[in-house]
Amino acid sequence: MEASQEQALHIDVGQDGLDQREGEDLLAAFCFSSDTHVRTDSAVIDLCLPPLGISQLIESWTTPYPVKHRRSGRVRISEGHEHAFAVIQLREAYPADLRSLTFEAYTEMLSAIQSTNCPHIIKIWNYFDRINEEEGGLERYRQFSWARSDAFERMNVSDDDLPTGTAIGTQGGNTLSLIALLSRHRLQRFENPRQVSAYRYPEQYGPRSPKFSRAGLVESENQNIFIVSGTAAVIGHQSVHPFDLASQTDVTFNNLSLLTQVAESFKREKITPKLDENSALRVYLRNPADYPYVEAQLRAKLKGSPTNVAFLHGDICRSELEIEIDGVRIN
Ligand code: 3EB
């Protein structure tokens, strides 16, 4: 098949080595393990988010089009035909100043993105250690949110232009990792009607609100992307069922189905805006012992055996939350 008739983007989750499709180029490989190595010159992104029930998982994003790998300062860029990734991973100093480091990382990454052929930021995954720990009088997640907000402001990204997001605590590595998915095509954003938009959260969650959109669609000629931000047991702006895994799991699934319902109302011919066994999902659990329960729940909800799911040991950005799920469906 001609590349032009094929889908531009594929995701595969596998356990052994790079699960690269025959004849395709690698845009990004998220390597989830308890390893903390930081690469500097490839599309492989090592993240200390240990997979549950297995020692290593690799989520590979590949494309039939040629990919150009380059660097812009400390930002690694993989540019394909319609999609690209920009990645920055910075070690934290001791004593740490996460707020300054986040501002530096964000402004450097956002500037580098301006030099790519894919100006639309679809999603930014944010990972760093000790997310709920207080440092210098403020929880590290709140320091991070503050700096991300300042950086978007500095770079003239308004609340109407925010990408989808995920912010999760890693289990070591001492590294701030920002991974941006970019596209030639714009993101059609939408919010969850049952939730206050994160960028309008009141100050009780930090001096500056978390700047992300809840979900979105990216339409292009051959392919569409439905993508959701990290989704948890939040209603309005409040966490519900604090520390209660089973109830939080239910609310999280409800929030995900609400987002898919909103996406349905945008629906064009070729879009399947749902999270099902053909989606790539990441399920983040604060407590590894919760894995068997959530795995069984997910299989029941999706009514199939999803192959592209990563269950990861990650800390949720509010200490009372036990579970968060993010996902993408390409079709
Ligand atoms: C929430 O709904 C839960 O700060 O980038 C989810 C997704 C959450 C992304 C972020 C935070 C972020 O507010 C937390």
Image (cartoon, rainbow, N blue to C red):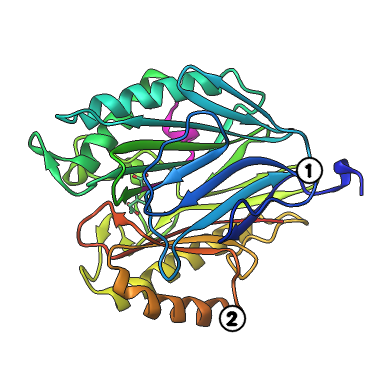
Residue 83 visible in rendering: yes
At numbered mark 2, what does the secondary structure look like: helix, strand or loop? loop
Residue type at tag 1: Pro
Q: Nearer the viewer, mark 2 or mark 1?
A: 1
- Residue at x 28% of width, y 63% of height: 286
Coordinates of residue 194 in the picture (x, y in percent): 39, 61
In screen coordinates, is 16 left or right of 209? right
- Residue at x 70% of width, y 47% of height: 9
Above-or-below relation of 232 to 80: below
At numbered mark 1, what does the secondary structure look like: helix, strand or loop? loop
Above-or-below relation of 51 to 63: below
The residue stretch that appears in magenta: 157-167
Disc 1: which residue = 64
Estimate the spatial distance between the alpha carbons at disc 2 and disc 1, rounded to whole Å: 30 Å
Residue situated in front as seen by the camera: 313 or 145: 313
Residue type at tag 2: Lys
Disc 2: which residue = 303
